[in-house]
Amino acid sequence: MNPNIPAPDGLPPRELNLYEKILVQLKPEVDTMFYNCYLKPAEQFSLTDDLLTIGVDDQHKREWLADRAGARIRQLASGISGRVMKVEFIYVGEMF
């Protein structure tokens, strides 16, 4: 697993954020359509010592992610960070 993302214009690569690290592990576990439609468009909104907040651009997707993938994302967040994590999905409207 490459923990970095190449940066544009010759800048040094940046380290993946926690949600991006989770996506790397989830991608081979889930259906391609689910990954591309629900997981990939979501973004890490904030991270504290014990809470990962994931921003989602659609209320239906927010509910669907929380119900269908919330437990697995929480498990991966805890494993990657080395501490017990809570995960929260928030509706942030159109992100980009």
Image (cartoon, helix red, strand yellow):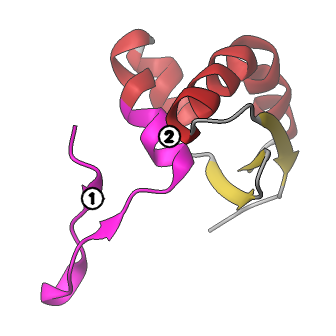
Residue 15 is inside the magenta segment? yes
Q: Within the magenta stretch, is there residue 71?
A: no
The residue positioned 80% from the left and 24% from the top of the image is 66
Which stretch is magenta?
Answer: 1-24
Residue beneath the point at 72% across and 59% down: 45
Label number found at residue 40:
2
Image position of 21 (left or right of 81): left
Q: Residues within 10 Å of mark 2 (few under 14, many from 20)?
A: some
Could you tell whether 63 is left or right of 74 in the image?
A: right
Depth check, front residue: 5 or 60: 5
Q: Position of residue 68 (x, y in %)?
A: 72, 12
| 24, above or below 12, in the image | above
Instruction: Give the x, y percent position of residue 73.
Output: 63, 25
Which image quarter is the C terminus in? bottom right
Direction from residue 28 to residue 38 in the image, left or right: right
Q: Which mark is residue 4?
A: 1
Residue 85 vertical placement versus 18 (above, below): above
The amino acid type of the residue labelled 1 equals Asn
Looking at the picture, tell me which residue is in the foreground, 54 or 12: 12
Q: Residues within 10 Å of mark 1 (few under 14, many from 20)?
A: some
Q: Quadrant of the N terminus?
A: top left
Which quadrant of the figure has residue 89? top right
Relative depth, front residue between 61 and 18: 18
Q: Quadrant of residue 26?
A: top left
